[in-house]
Amino acid sequence: MAEGVLFELAGTVLEGLGKAAIKEAASWWGARDDLKKLEKTINLIQARVRDAERHREEDGSDAIKEWLRRLRMVLYQVDDLFDLVLTVDLQKQQMEVNKQVCVSFSRSGTLCFNWKISREIKSIRQQLDEINSDIAGLNLNAYTDHKDEPQPQRARFMRNRETCSFVKTEDVIGRETDKNIIIGMLFDPNYDDGKKITVIPIVGFGGLGKTTLAQLVFNDENVRKHFDLATWACVPEVGDQSIVMRRVYQSLTGDTDSYSPLVGQIKSGIQDSIKDKKYLLVLDDIWDDSRDSWLDLLKLLECGASGSRVIVTTRSANVAKAVGTTKAHNLGLLAEEDSWNLFKNIAFQSKQEQNNPVLTQLGKEIVDSCGHVPLAIRVVGSLLYTENEKGWRRIRNARLSEAKGKEDNNIMQVLKLSYNYLPPTLKQCFAYCSLFPKDYEYSKDDLVKLWMAQGYFDPSDTDTGERYFLELLGRNLFQDPNEDDEGNVKRCKMHDLVHDLALDIAGEEMKQIEHLDQISSPGGLMHLRIEVKKPEDDGWEVPVSLLAARKMRSLLLSGSEYVCTTIKASSLKLVILKYQSLRVLNLENMEISVVPNSVGKLRHLRYLNLARNIGIKCLPDDITRLQNLQTLKLVSCSSLKELPRDFCKLDHLRHLEIAWSGLRDLPLGFGKMKSLKELDQFVVGKSCGIDSLPPLNICELLINFRMWRSDAVVEAQRANLKDNQLLTSLELNFQPMEVTPDLSELDKMLMFLQLPPNLKDVRVDDYEGVEFPRRWLDGLSKLVSIRIDDCSNCRILPYMSRLPYLNDLSLYKLDALEFVEDEDDIWVSGGELCGSGAQNGYFPSLTTLTIWDSRSLKGWTRPATDDDSETRQLLFPRLQRMRLFECLKLTSMPLAPKLEFLEVQHFNWKVLESNLMSIDDEIASSLSSSKLFTSLKDVSISAIEDGPTYLTISSMLSNLQNLRISGCNELTSLMIESSNSIQCLSIHFCNSLEYITLGNLSVLETLFFSNLKKLTQLPEEMGNLSLLYIENCPELASLPQSLVGLTSIQELEFSRLEKLTQLPEEMGNLSLLRKLKIKKCPELASLPQSLLGLTSLQKLSIKDCPNLKERYEKPNGQDWHLLQHIPEVIM
């Protein structure tokens, strides 16, 4: 470990010496004097330990390394001893409070325990005396520059920063030229040159920004539009091509299931994903330079369309030669001006540069010493952000000149400098990150819990761990932050060079391994993560050699990403027996079915992860003896039905994760767990009502009502749910309930359940009540999203129209609901049209509305009870997206003048009539614009009931870009008026459609016609198409002559046209045609001779066309030679 860490550990031990329980235990058998001597010895050692750490860093002396190792092991031994004493004392206090008697805490038991403690204190004191006496032989020089550093550093760290200093991808400086060069290579058809695939390598040493450059290119808007498919696969230091292939498969298919397919399925999955598509694939951080090992993958990637590209980033020129089909793009250093601009953005606070010319000069010297390497500049700039002028001078004078050059190990000097300036506690946090592999995405919440389990910060200060995480991010030791909608950082990654630094710092104390031969000295191993790759048939077994690491504090077992992994029951028992010092035990997804009762002997354990072990049916009773347990993860333990009876004795449990488990109840007294601060799911069952929900410090919560309780209404009145001020997302789930509730009582219970005032998202599932309380959501002024799902009896919904920030409303499977609201309840100001512009108008912020499978729904508003009242026309002033599915009785909806996306399926045609076709002039004149629905960009109409036989799409829809019509079986004629906006038109499964008329669609690029059984002819006007797809139109006997005028068309496909006999002879005019596919056209006997003139045609595919196969198949077809100029012919 690095300078300051052992100093801090010694300080922790000294702090423990002052605890009353330690002094009492040492007061027996003459150990009190040993305790005093122990304190004196540790003080003497602490005074010199930082000198020893500095010597170790500078000259690497083996003697000093061994001395520090001995000291570290003894200090950990003291820490374990003190922790045990405090744990036993805590158990004793709990027994006294509960007035229980235990043999362990009888007078004889106490004597025995204290005697053992006294003996161990004597032994530790003797070991430390020997270590102290050996200091003289180390010949340590006394350093003066670290004597007063810890407190000022800690103060600087804890001071609030003015701004966030890390730089996001959009803030990248100095790579615009490189980006344009790569994009040019992506777009330039000359790079195809008859090749099946073009591979573009980006080469440069670590820290130059190869991945960042690839991200800039990948996320460019024009690049995304240019390719049919764009995907990214990161394969850092992976030499196994089967793993590379799996990651490519995952990136293309999105299939990340750990129970992954076989190699054959992976290969077919890759081909199916990219077949006939122009794709972009980025392979980031490639290391394998064996050409032969790449051939199999490259062969698979050849089935894409012409113009496909693969970008490879690598540090190795040999890799670039092995995989590249073009000259590699060698990424250089930043220009001097760009280096300075990048540094300024990170290192200087607001206006600091202008006000302090001294810092400016120092900064330019520091930038020069960074060798114009972006990573080095970022890290050093982040370090300087909180330093004063003295700090800038000290860093300028450090050995930054070693960073000049182009070798990764020189950049490490810069990274090491930033690490050296971390406070000791942060150094431990940083080193702990070495337990995870490169390109690992660190979860902030989980990493903070692991740090807390190791005692790197006081668990009572819940914000400290998060500050630590953000400080490492602010210093650019983390990167690529993943933020939630509120801008809170949730996950980060670590640059591979920074990860190398963490590995170097961790040394032999922390290891993440795949093979046990990677451990040279298991005796000093304290933290271990094992990637279990190839388990035996009956499960993974802990190797005997590993059992020497008796003082292990972290054991994280990780199953292979691709192999189902289990651990032998005997090995699990052995791990618990041997590793009694464990603070962290991670057994996630290890197919455990029985947790040994001996787990209760892990008295130091703070973090236990049993998630995703679906075979666990119960937890052992002795797990409640884990007095120090802070985090327990039981997510997706679907067979787990209950927790141990004495679970609430876990007084220090702060984080409990039980979502998607099988729990149907929580233990009696659960609400009295005062330390519990995080809970992802609360279960209302036999033992716990809603009033047992403890006060929590969380943002998201799921409440599962598993049983109807007779006192549910009273319990809802007593519940303190409203006091959870931080709660922003709440889900209430009522299915399945073991006892059928009285529906009127259920409605009352919900009425009394007062919701937290800061909620932004509310979801209710499987509520069996008839009425939601009308005013249930009143006062929730921050509510953004509401989803009500599968509430089959519900007839009345809560008031929602006045929620000022409600943005997204989803109503699913509300079988009994006839109207969303009553017209009598709608407030209309001064007779104005609701929502016509008032700030507190009707659904003032709603932009997305989804209604799905509500079969009784007749309309949005129930008609007023006063028969003489005038029906008011409502509108959603800001609605942009509306989706309506399976609502056959729905005949009307409020108007939506700003609607951009409309999708309707299996619905009543009158909904469209009321919204798109029957707009009253008086209503239109009351709006700011006289043209309603001109904002529509995307319309999808499918499976309508009582639809028209004739439909005209008006040219008034001047922004309509995509139109899809499907399953409209009554439609016989379709006319689309001239439009300067429609780009894509798709018409499918309209069995009665005979005539399609298209006006002048000047920007139409893509046209799909399929399964139109009565269509006899295509429209004469077809815009400026680049893609035409015609399938299963059995009555279509010929193609229009206007087809040959589509001079911009690039892809043509004709499939299942049973009466088609010929193609237009003038097809040779289609000079840009790249791909022609003909399938199942049995009457088509020949191809036009003019195909010889199609010089751009790259691919011709003919399938299930017997006449064409006989005539054109190589080598016996009489006219096969006419196709020789086409690079790829599939017959």
Image (cartoon, grey):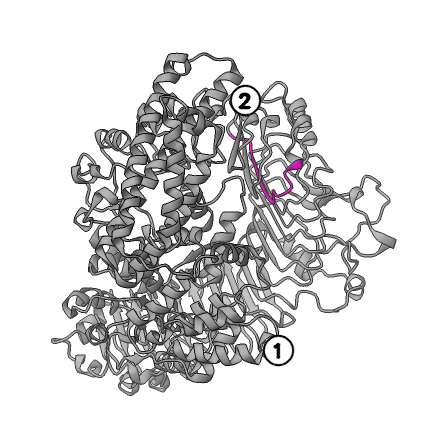
Q: Is residue 752 magenta?
A: no
Task: Say whether disc 1 or disc 2 marks the residue closer to the N-terminus.
Answer: 1
Q: What residue did someone put label 1 on?
A: 355
> Which mark lies nearer to you, 1 or 2?
1
Q: Is residue 734 magenta?
A: yes
Query: Does residue 268 lie above or below 575 as drawn?
Result: below
Real-space CA distance between mark 1 and mark 2, rounded to the nearest whole angstrom:
61 Å
- Left of 141 or right of it: where is 381? right
Query: Does residue 1090 lie above or below 1026 as drawn?
Result: below
Q: Nearer the viewer, residue 860 or 701?
A: 701
At numbered mark 2, what does the secondary structure look like: helix, strand or loop?
A: loop
- Left of 639 or right of it: where is 325? left
Query: In the rendered image, is residue 843 in sight?
Result: yes
- Quadrant for residue 200, please give it: bottom left
Q: Nearer the viewer, residue 971 or 185?
A: 185
Count of residue discs: 2
Give the magenta part as a residue range. 723-735
- Residue 396 horizontal/vertical position (percent): 44, 74
- Quadrant for residue 327, please give it: bottom left
Q: What residue did someone put label 2 on?
A: 669
Query: Does residue 941 lie above or below 709 as drawn?
Result: below
Q: Residue at x 53, y 61 (%)?
A: 972
- Left of 895 or right of it: where is 633? left
- Residue 680 horizontal/vertical position (percent): 51, 38
At numbered mark 1, what does the secondary structure look like: helix, strand or loop?
A: helix
Q: Residue furthest left?
A: 1116
Query: Does residue 694 lie above or below 364 as drawn?
Result: above
- Residue 323 horizontal/vertical position (percent): 22, 72
